[in-house]
Image: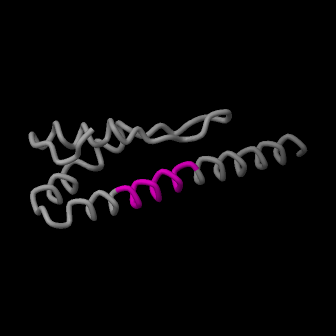
Amino acid sequence: MNTVKKLGTFAIALTAVLGFKFHSKASTAKEVKQKMIAVCASDQDCSSAVNAYFKSCFDDSYRMGSRRRPSSLDTQKLAGCINSNSGIEFFGI
């Protein structure tokens, strides 16, 4: 029975850690996308490019981190990815 309690505690802790990491990624994505759309406020093509390519470019640019390293976002890589996928340089790097 003691082993079952340990496994249960481990499963709950693992779920909490993974849930926090994915929540952090989702909230970062939402915040960054809102800021990029705000930068593109006057250019409809720029807003369309952000909406079309943001998810895949964000996934390529975001690192979840590990126990010893925090998560990080390479903003230059993100902007460059959106620029190259759209074929127009909306964001200066």
Image quadrant occupied by the N terminus: top right
Q: How is the rendered protein coloured?
A: one colour
Residue 4 position within the rendered picture, expressed as x and y whole percent measured from the top left: 82, 45
Asked if 39 appears above or below 91 in the picture, the reply is below
Q: Is residue 51 above or below residue 2?
A: below
Residue at 54% across, 41% down: 71
Residue lying at the far right in this picture: please name it.
2
Image check: 32 left or right of 71? left
Extent of the magenta region: 21-32
Q: Where residue 64 sits: x, y (%)?
A: 52, 39
Q: How many marks?
A: 0
Residue at 27 percent across and 50 percent down: it is: 54
> Which of the pair 58/10 is nearer the observer?
58
Q: On the picture, is 34 further left or further right than 21?
A: left
Which residue appears at 25% of the width and 37% of the height?
Answer: 80
| Quadrant assignment, res 51 | bottom left
Q: Seen in the image, is 72 located left or right of residue 42?
A: right
Q: Residue drawn at (75%, 44%), measured in percent from left and top?
A: 10
Name the residue nearer the viewer: 12 or 2: 12
Image quarter where the C terminus lies is top left
Judge whether residue 20 is colored magenta.
Answer: no
Pinpoint residue 47: horizontal percent, then vertical percent. 17, 59
User: Relative to residue 48, is residue 17 depicted above or below?
Assistant: above
Left or right? Give the position of 59 relative to 44.
Answer: right
Q: Position of residue 66 (x, y in %)?
A: 61, 34
44 and 14: which one is in front? 44
- Is 81 drawn above or below residue 13 in the view shown? above
Secondary structure character of the magenta stretch overall:
helix
